[in-house]
Amino acid sequence: MLRCVAYKEAMKAEWDRFALANGTIYHTTGFQQVLVDSFGYSSLYHAVVDTEDRICAIIPLIVGRNLGLRKVGVSLPFTNYMDLCAINEEVFQFAIESIQQIKNRSGLHYIELRLKDESLNSPEWNLNDHNHTFVLALSEGEDKVLAMSSSSNRNHVRKVYKNDWFDVSFDPRHLDKFYQVYVRRMKQLGSPAQAISFFKRLFDYLPEHAFLLTVLDKQTGAVAGGMILLTNPSNSTVYYPYGANLSEYNNKYLNNFMYWEAVRFGIRNGYQYLDLGRSQTGSGTYKYKEQWGAKAEKLSYLVYSGGQQAAGAPDKQSLQLFIDLWKVIPSFITNPVGRILIKYLLP
């Protein structure tokens, strides 16, 4: 007989073992702590256990307020996907039924799931399948990885190294400078940025798995761009969830250099895959990642509202006016406001 039980601190070791063996670094209690401490969310984590109290599936669920100030549950904000890691279909279906009960019992307006390898076909759940993640295979080595990309991308990678414009660093002391680049780039894209404390907590709570890759202008030593990389040894994957670069370096192919250094990092450390993160179908980032030869994998974003009218997190189209305004409002306003506002976006 299966049971759904609320997470307790005594479950931490078993939860994290199960998460790392069957899921990703985002499933661990460390990432939960990052979200709770950074944004003041509530944790509503649950596990499905068998008769011997062994974990058979995990339900990482964060509770916060959305832009309409409704109390909602998301699994998980600031992640691209979050499977329940159920050991079989029976457990998965039990977990889904349990999530619906959690929603009603906790007074949530809706619950949003972001699935990748698991799928759910139910009229009770509203599906958005416009998001993809891109996974680049690394196991064949640098030459084969580069050969998978488009000819123009290969030329840009070779040109940036031939001209010797940049250095790469993995020194975490560059975080403050990287953050300045990140905030500036997010504003150019019309998006608020989380506080630097969010990134610092990644290194505090996930010290063995978080890495900062920064690109330095070789002439000036200035930080021109960077990526935060999270590693997951159990599925041999490096994840690229957050990054940015200064647009004035676009003509020097900084982005190509940065992505290629992430590839080299993964290969050098024995990882087989590089997950390049979420993009919407047909977007500019979708096309850019596609030219690397990465495999597009469709994500299922599902919302359960129990019959209430709820559509989950807003998409880019519905926020276009807000995005355009954000780009032109002065930074001395958007920077502090953005650090408060982003928690309600539940991105």
Image (spheres, rainbow, N blue to C red):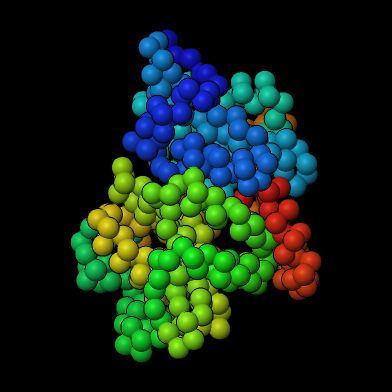
**Residue 262 drawn at (x, y percent):** 37, 65
Q: Residue 133: percent from the left, percent from the top?
A: 44, 54
- Residue at (31%, 60%) from the top-left corner? 266
Q: Is residue 133 above or below residue 101?
A: below
Relative vertical location of residue 95 with respect to residue 165 in this rendering, above or below? above
Q: Where is residue 48 in the image (x, y as percent from the top left)?
A: 46, 21
Q: Which residue is drawn at 44% across and 14% down?
A: 2
Left or right for 328, reference 286 = right
Q: In which quarter of the image is the N terminus?
A: top left
Q: Is residue 114 visible?
A: no
User: How many numbered marks, from 0 up?
Assistant: 0
Q: Position of residue 5 (x, y in %)?
A: 52, 18
Q: State the residue at coordinates (35%, 79%).
A: 157
Q: Is residue 170 visible?
A: yes
Q: Quadrant of residue 263?
A: bottom left
At 51% from the left and 77% from the top, the residue drawn is: 224
The residue lying toward the viewer, choosing from 15 and 3, is 15
Residue placed most toward the observer, 299 or 226: 226
Image quadrant where residue 124 sits: top right
Residue 190 as seen in the image, left or right of residue 225: right
In the shown orientation, is residue 189 left or right of residue 27?
right
Horizontal arrangement in the rendering, residue 129 relative to residue 159 (left or right): right
Residue at the front extreme, as displayed: 173
